[in-house]
Image (cartoon, rainbow, N blue to C red):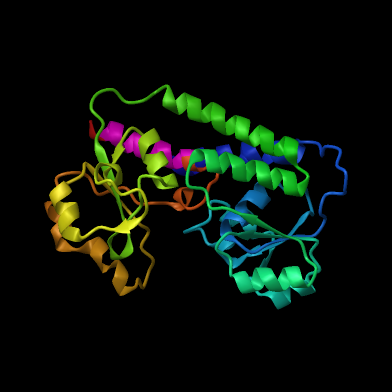
Amino acid sequence: MWASVRSSSLAFMLAAGLAASVPAWAEPAPARVVSINLCTDQLAMLLAAPGQLRSVTMLARDPSVSVLAELAQGYKVNHGKAEEIYLDRPDLVLAGRYTAQTTVNMLRDLGIRVEIFEPAQSFADLRADILQMGQVLGRDRAAAEIVAAFDTRLAQLQAKQPEGPRPVAATWSARGYMSGSQSLAAEIISTAGYDHLAERLGRKGGSFLPLEALVLADPDLVIEGHSRAGHARSEEVLAHPALHVLTGRKAAVQTPDWVCGLPAVLDAVEGLRTGQEGAQ
């Protein structure tokens, strides 16, 4: 069911992006755009005009972290190296705040325009990133339409908040990492009708929560991080026997919808909401 929800919402956003006309600009929109960050990969794929986006990272094709993995199959991939990017002759490179600074500096020294995008820590950041991408690609109208569609769907979800006391949810990833109360994950959780354990513990930023503390808190829902085949030892905590004493659910797993600030975060909200309703 979630595949159909996600595919229909992405189809709408892509149609809006491709149908929107390009506004008048003081200078031409970039024609050879390269993305070297997973989140800018997906923002650009949502918004770029046909033929405008020339290359995305290999991660964009990984369905465990990318909601647009199938669409990314139609793009050339890059490995984020300055040399290969330069040879592609881009007139715009899209990067994240934590993209290797040496790569960014080298590209700028070569006279290539590099636009930096901040990681989305909230729905407000998500909107800002979409609008920024629209602005740098010359696709302002398409970006505004996607934001409007996001806000419409968000309002519909907020109007259907579950009644009664709010259950508590906690994220739980490799090495016991828990997202903070001021994070994109926290807003997903709150919109779905849960209180985030991090907020109750006063942890604004992401932090590592000892297994004992998680067991003592005994949240109603533990949202586990995605575990890959051949996982590292840091992920062994996700299968620790002590987790079996938790009285709440431990069925939810963070999907690609949680990774970047994209409209697909509302698919994550719906996934949590459906699980909550099924548990009542």
Q: Can you tell which quarter of the image residue 219 is in?
A: top left
Observer-nearest of 48 and 129: 129
> Residue 75 in magenta?
no
Q: Is residue 159 above or below residue 121?
A: above
Tell whether 89 sits left or right of 249.
right
Q: Is residue 79 visible?
A: no
Query: Who's the residue at 23% across and 63% down the image?
Result: 239
Q: Is residue 249 visible?
A: yes
Q: Position of residue 82 (x, y in %)?
A: 69, 74
Q: Is residue 277 magenta?
A: yes
Q: Residue at x 21, y 60 (%)?
A: 210
Q: Which residues are magenta?
A: 266-278
The x and y percentages for residue 207 are 32, 57
Corner quadrant of residue 167: top left
Picture quadrant of residue 41:
bottom right
Q: Main secondary structure of the magenta part?
A: helix
Q: Is residue 130 above or below residue 33?
A: above
Query: Which quarter shows the C terminus?
Result: top left
Q: How many marks?
A: 0
Question: From the viewer's perspective, is residue 188 above or below residue 90?
Answer: above
Q: Residue at x 63, y 38 (%)?
A: 13
In the visual, does 270 lie left or right of 106? left
Of 263 and 14, nearer the camera is: 263
The quarter of the image holding the N terminus is top left
The reply, left or right, for residue 16 in relation to residue 197 is right
Residue sitting at the far bottom = 83
* 98 left or right of 103 in image: left
Residue 221 at what x, y percent from top left? Answer: 25, 44
Residue situated in front as seen by the camera: 132 or 79: 132
